[in-house]
Image (cartoon, helix red, strand yellow):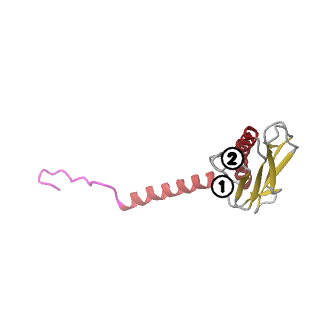
Amino acid sequence: MSLLGVAKRQQGFTLLELLVVLTVMALGSAGVALAMRSTPQQQLQEESQRLVAWLEAARTQARSQGLVVRAKFEMDGVTVLGLPRATLAQPRLQWLHSQTQAVPSELVLGPEPILPAQSIRLQHQRDPLATVLISTQGLRPFAPQP
């Protein structure tokens, strides 16, 4: 007690209060991290969206320059063959997820405006049921198929 008879108030937080708050924050963070984790099928959907945009950019360049262009699929990504180096901003596309693989290993992208029907299947190495088919019937752009 002070001289005036008024009890001094405690300032700050107790150790127990701080531990409770930290525990609640840790549990909340763990819940968010688990909720944001993507499944193999979601990972392949992400890869397919990027791949379709990239294939169409390479296909457009092949048509405009009149060059025979191929996309070669490898374990860690895709490389465009046949275009001058400075034509595409990204002549090689790395997979976002290391478990992605593509079958077959090559597509023809040009120079003809109408290509033969082609498709590529993206697969997840750990989950054989997770696949995405990307195809074109020749005139339309590449697109993921349901």
Q: Does residue 64 sit above or below 70 in this rendering?
A: above
Circle 1 is placed at which residue position? Answer: 96
Disc 1 vs disc 2: Cβ atoms closer than 8 Å? yes
> Quarter of the image holding residue 10?
bottom left
Asked if residue 4 is among those painted magenta in the image, a careful observer would answer yes
Q: What stretch is highlighted in magenta?
A: 1-14
Q: Picture coordinates of residue 131 (x, y %)?
A: 80, 53
Residue 133 appears in the figure: no
Q: Helix, strand, or loop for circle 1?
A: loop
* Viewer-proximal residue among 5 and 86: 86
Say few, some or many: other residues with alpha carbon within 10 Å of mark 1 (under 14 / 14 to 19 / 20 or more). some
Query: The disc labelled 2 sits on which kind of residue?
Result: Arg
Q: Helix, strand, or loop for circle 2?
A: helix
Q: Main secondary structure of the magenta part?
A: loop
Circle 2 is placed at which residue position? Answer: 50
Query: The disc labelled 1 sits on which kind of residue?
Result: Leu
